[in-house]
Amino acid sequence: MDLPLEIRDTIIEDLRIQDLAILVRTSQSVQAYLEPRLYNMIYTRIDTSHNTAGLVELLQRRAHIAPMIKTLVLDEYHPRHTRRLLSIEMPNLWRVLVQHEGDSIEYVSEREKRALNRAMVEQPKISN
């Protein structure tokens, strides 16, 4: 994309996430420019492959994404997968929002919670 930044940004602002995801695959320079914008804020969706467990799997497969994440919006509270997610180092993460209402999705024993808690890493920029 050999366009001035202002024009490039104007075009990108009008694209849907699905279109951005396709555009990212067109060249390495476009990928380097767009990926940080795609992964700046991550949303999970309960009862889909885009839930917290799916996000953990994505970040394990594509570890280079983790430093791009600044905000996580979790649509569920899953004790095991939320702790697994927070065991991944995300150096630029500064906010986690959990939008789940009601009880947690599954039971996790206190012993397993303690073991998962020990694996969690400090996310130094979190401010909430």
Image: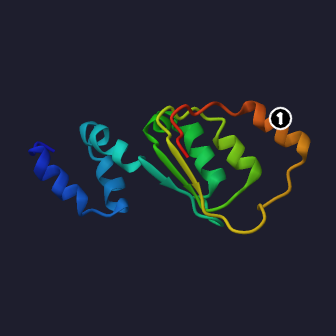
Quick one: quadrant of the N terminus? top left
Viewer-proximal residue, 32 or 73?
Answer: 73
Tell me: 97 left or right of 30. Answer: right
In the image, residue 30 lies at what x, y percent? 25, 42
In the image, residue 73 lies at what x, y percent? 54, 56
The residue drawn where x is 86% and y is 41% is 112
The residue drawn where x is 86% and y is 56% is 107
The residue drawn where x is 90% and y is 48% is 109
What amino acid type is highlighted by mark number 1?
Answer: Ala
Which of the 4 quarters of the picture holds residue 74?
A: bottom right
The residue drawn where x is 63% and y is 65% is 46
In the image, residue 29 lies at what x, y percent? 24, 37
Residue furthest out toward the front: 128
Secondary element at image label 1: helix
Tell me: 101 left or right of 31. Answer: right
- Give the class, few, some or many, for how many residues have Cα within 10 Å of label 1's Cα (few <14, many ≥20): few
Q: How many marks?
A: 1
Q: Which residue is mark 1?
A: 115
Viewer-proximal residue, 29 or 108?
Answer: 108
Tell me: 103 left or right of 67. Answer: right
